[in-house]
Every structure is written in C-alpha cells, then in structure tokens.
Image (tube, helix red, strand yellow):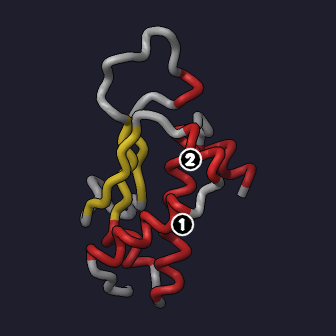
Amino acid sequence: MVEVSRQRFEALVAEALDSLPPQLGRQMSNIAVVVEDEPPSPGLLGLYEGVPLTQRGDWYSGVLPDRITIYRRSICDLGRTEEQVVGQVRVTVIHEVAHHFGIDDGRLAELG
C-alpha cells in the first residue's frame, strides 16, 4: 500500500482527465468527477453513475450531472509505488469515462 495525500490524489485524477484526447474531452457533457476516500463496497476503484451519452435523447434535459467517483484508498491499497498508483488512477479514470460514452465492461475487457 502507498499513502498518497488527498490533494496529490486529486491532482492525479485531474492529470488523468487532462491526458484524454481533446476531442473526447469536448464531447463529455453534464458530468462531475469527484474523489472519495472510501468506496461503498470493498475493492471498488471507481464508479460511474448517470445516463451514458449513447442513451441520451430528446427527453434528456434538466437532470443532475452524471457522476464519476474515484476511490482513493482502494487505488492506494493496490499500489506498491506511487508510479503504480499513478497508472491505476489513469486506468480507472479512463474506464469510468468510457462508461460515460456508453462502453460497457464487456467491451472494455475486449479492448484491454
């Protein structure tokens, strides 16, 4: 386990988001990305809650933002070095952003 401060961890999440291709970032809509220390269930690294872009239609208006939550302790528990934590943050952020774009876990597994 590697202890990464909340402030540093939030910076890692921001860096991961900033590393997304600009064309993807511009397409992200009505979404908030937050960091929580503890997950609702053990071992959960991240969670997407909302309506994926692929499922939004004319009815989609006046709704609260989708939410991506990245869980600091779960990710830090996996890392033996800060570099491993940095890598896992990036993978987790990309995974959850993919859900925002309508990509399910099965397809993500296929993509690696």
Residue closer to the observer: 13 or 46: 13
Residue 49 at least partly seen? no
Where disc 2 sits, the SS reads helix
Q: x and y percent of residue 11 in the render?
A: 38, 71
Judged left or right of residue 106, residue 30 is left
Task: Residue under label 2, please give it.
Answer: 25
Left or right: where 23 falls relative to 49: right
Foreground label between 2 and 1: 2
Residue 38's x, y, as percent? Answer: 25, 63
At horizontal 56% and vertical 47% (from top left) the residue drawn is 25
Callout 1 secondary element: helix
Whether 100 is drawn above or below 18: the answer is above
Badge 1: few (under 14), some or many (20 or more) residues near its Cα, within 10 Å?
Answer: some
Query: How far is mark 2 from mark 1, CA to CA?
Result: 15 Å
User: Would residue 112 be visible to someone looking at this image?
Assistant: yes
Residue lying farthest to the bottom in this orientation: 81
Report the amino acid beneath label 2.
Answer: Gly
At 42% from the left and 61% from the top, the residue drawn is: 45
The quarter holding residue 70 reads bottom left
Instruction: Identify the residue under disc 1.
Output: 90
Question: Is the residue 70 above or below the residue 27 in the image?
Answer: below
Residue 34: which numbered mark, if any? Answer: none
What is the x, y in percent for residue 86? Answer: 50, 77
**Quick check: marks 2 and 1 in contact, CB under 8 Å?**
no
Residue at 27%, 53% (x, y): give it.
Answer: 40
Q: Amino acid at mark 1?
A: Arg
Image quarter of the N terminus: bottom left
